[in-house]
Image (cartoon, rainbow, N blue to C red):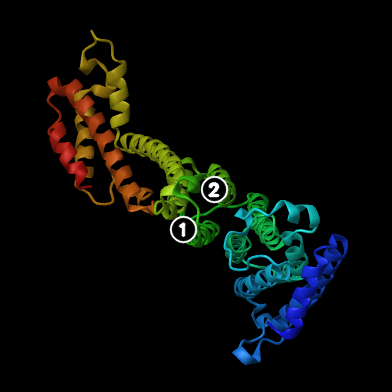
Amino acid sequence: DTPAGAVLKRVLKLLGERPVYFNHCLRDIARVRKQALLQRFLEALSQGDASFGARPIELQACDPVRYVGDMLAWIHENVAAEREAVLVLMGKDASSSKLRERKESESEIATAAVSYEEILDIALEGVASTLASKTKQALQANVAIVTVYKVAQVFSFFANTLEEVLQRKEAILVATCADLHARTYQNFLDLWETQAQKLRQGVAGVYVAALSTPPFVVEAVNTLSEVLSIYEMAPVPAGEREADFLPILSAAFDPLLNHCQQVATMMDKADGQVFLMNCVSSMQGPLRKHDFTAQRVGMYTALLSDQVKHLVEGQAKAVLTKVGLSERLKALREKAADTPLSAVPELHPVSLAATLRSFYNSLFTLGGALSLPLLERIEDRGLRDEARTGVSQQIASAYEELYNGIEELGVATHTPAQVRTLLEGV
């Protein structure tokens, strides 16, 4: 609106009749505006803006998320003004909000080889390249996984925002933000892979005596929990979230689960089962809170059920062997139909009565043969109760089978129902 500006617009209008000169002048003007915009951007980075009380953006360089966010916020604020200026220079309708939908006249197409988009890209390419270089510098240091993910999400947000302002996905700033998002996101996945490599190198000699969830699992679970909370706010359609988040979930938990399974194989079988259950239930915890991780929750639930099943079978077998019922039950199953019970040494009334008395005593003794200290090391209460119940049921079923087979001897003093009730209180 200045006199000089009015003259410039008048000159450009007249030059419109000479396309070659018109295009040349527009490109020169765009280059000048590029330098001016870049200079203002550099001043905002290093000096701030005293008139608005804005501090230098580079003061936030130690915080990559805020640093990148402040740079993009400044760019977003100035891009709209630059777009309007270029529209005015080219004699277009600056108030139109749908530039791409407005068709140019055939005469404009015939006389103007240079496009509005090309001129605007020239004016903005300086800040685009500077943004890319500054971001690269900010992420060169050892940055936390969550921080890298946050930066990737910032680029994703501004790529969409700038696309709305510039109304063009191919605009240089939109393309730059999209490229930086892709690079940062890949860097985020690479950091998970780096952690996985460290885990693979440290398998030998690993033994977790407490069987509790080890620190490396707790750390990974906490990290993914933060990522999940950030992803919840991402503008991704509900129907696309599961597939969109799957690469992150696979990078974070697949190597971790493989490592836990390797560690478990180096332990005693029952110890390894408890250890793996603790690790998987810890990994499953944050996933239960989100609908888009339901498939992975289901996979871990099946794995936990399988581990509980094998642990229950092993613990029940150990208890039955310890109290002597396993040997008696085996003899009963293998006995020929026409052979009397008293003719089988393991089922002789005297020895059988002694075994049953010992079993009954253990039902009333705390810390006796029926105590299951290994199950107490299962961290998840639901899984712990499921395992206890499973062992009690298998012992009760075994006793009921033995009771029915030796009932004629009259040595069993407790019914299966009584034993089942007592086991529930163990």
Please name the residue shown 84% across and 69% down the image. Answer: 25
Give x and y (percent) for residue 189.
Answer: 64, 54
Give x and y (percent) for residue 336.
Answer: 28, 10
Q: Nearer the viewer, residue 394 or 191?
A: 191
Give x and y (percent) for residue 55.
Answer: 63, 87
Please name the residue shown 32% across and 53% down the image. Answer: 381
CA gap, disc 2 and disc 1: 12 Å
Q: Which residue is mark 2?
A: 244
Q: Nearer the viewer, residue 269 or 63?
A: 63
* Amino acid on which the number 1 mark rests in the picture: Glu
* Label pair 2/1, CB-CB below 8 angstroms: no
Q: Which residue is mark 1?
A: 232
Which is more N-terminal, label 1 or label 2?
1
Please tell me in which quadrant of the rendered image residue 347 appears: top left
| Image position of 29 with respect to 381: above or below | below
Residue 248, visible in the rendered structure:
yes
Residue 157 is left or right of residue 391, and the answer is right
Give x and y (percent) for residue 232.
Answer: 46, 58
Residues packed near mark 1 inside 10 Å, few (<14), some (14 to 19) or many (20 plus): few
Residue 70 is left or right of residue 287, and the answer is right
Q: Nearer the viewer, residue 284 or 413?
A: 284
* Amino acid on which the number 2 mark rests in the picture: Asp
Please name the residue shown 14% across and 28% down the image. Answer: 411
Residue 369, visible in the rendered structure:
no
Please tell me in which quadrant of the rendered image residue 182 appears: bottom right
Task: State the mark number for residue 313.
Answer: none
Residue 357 is left or right of residue 144, and the answer is left
Q: Secondary structure at mark 2?
A: helix
Residues packed near mark 2 inside 10 Å, few (<14), some (14 to 19) or many (20 plus): some
Please name the residue shown 61% across and 73% down the image. Answer: 73
| Image quadrant where one finds the N terminus | bottom right
